[in-house]
């Protein structure tokens, strides 16, 4: 019977210093590593913001379908796509305001009426952690053009 090597699978798919370089300092990243990190970030954030853009049209949410909320969500979605395609620092800086916009939304419009205290706390913590992580994304985009290429294997 063949047994699975869980440890090597975990390292290969979750912690691969080339494809998942989240613990590598920005100053030590190669363009390949930065590209992988930005790609994964942009993929996740684009899907999230596209969903928020669609949901923001609903008049049942606390902002009651205000057009500014949808416009902001679409702008952030577009900037995330631009970041993924160009790795440009301006796109990274624009994308980085997404969690701050989420926190501002909560301060202006409040939480969904059906959200419990735990839901509210988790949302605020996730937005805060996302905001902190965006410092790294902006730093990667700022340094991307000067990063060394991956050495040949």
Image (spheres, rainbow, N blue to C red):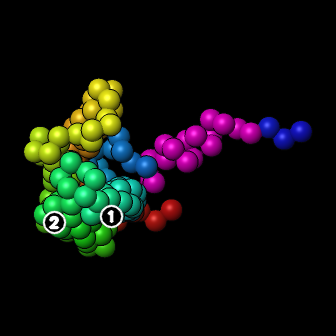
From the top left corner, tell me how far across and down residue 153 is, in percent.
51, 62
Q: Is residue 103 visible?
A: no
Left or right: residue 104 compared with residue 58: left
Which residue is at a point 46% across and 65% down the rendered structure image? 152
C-alpha gap between disc 1 and disc 2: 12 Å
Left or right: residue 63 compared with residue 4: left
Q: Is residue 17 magenta?
A: yes
Position of the N terminus, as image quadrant, is top right
Q: Name the outermost residue toward the top.
A: 117
Q: Is residue 123 magenta?
A: no
Residue 6 falls in image quadrant:
top right
Depth check: 90 or 128 in front?
128
From the top left corner, tell me how far across and down residue 40 is, in percent.
40, 57
Mark 2 Cα shell of 10 Å, populated few (<14), some (14-19), many (≥20):
few
Are the residues flagged by discs 1 and 2 in contact, CB closer than 8 Å?
A: no
From the top left corner, tell me how far across and down residue 59 is, in percent.
25, 58
Looking at the rendering, the stretch of residues picked out in magenta corresponds to 4-19
Which residue is at a point 27% across and 41% down the rendered structure image? 112
Q: Is residue 23 above or below residue 31?
A: above
Q: Is residue 24 visible?
A: yes
From the top left corner, tell me how far across and down residue 81 is, in percent.
30, 69
Q: Which residue is the site of mark 2?
A: 67
Depth check: 96 or 137 in front?
96
Q: Which residue is the site of mark 1?
A: 54
Q: Earlier in the sequence, mark 1 or mark 2?
A: 1
Which residue is at a point 84% across and 41% down the rendered structure image? 2
């Amino acid at each position: 019977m063949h047994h699975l090597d869980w440890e090597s699978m975990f390292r290969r798919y979750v912690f691969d210093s080339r494809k998942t370089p989240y613990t590598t300092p920005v100053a030590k990243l190669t363009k390949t590593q930065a590209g992988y990190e930005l790609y994964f970030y942009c993929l996740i954030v684009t899907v999230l913001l596209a969903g928020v853009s669609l949901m923001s049209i609903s008049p049942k949410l606390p902002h009651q379908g205000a057009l500014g909320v949808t416009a902001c969500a679409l702008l952030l979605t577009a900037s995330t796509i631009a970041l993924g395609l160009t790795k440009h620092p301006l796109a990274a800086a624009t994308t980085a305001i997404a969690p701050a916009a989420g926190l501002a939304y909560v301060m202006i419009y409040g939480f969904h009426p059906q959200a419990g205290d735990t839901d509210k706390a988790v949302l605020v913590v996730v937005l805060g952690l996302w905001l902190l992580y965006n410092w790294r994304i902006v730093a990667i985009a700022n340094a991307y053009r000067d990063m060394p290429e991956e050495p040949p294997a």
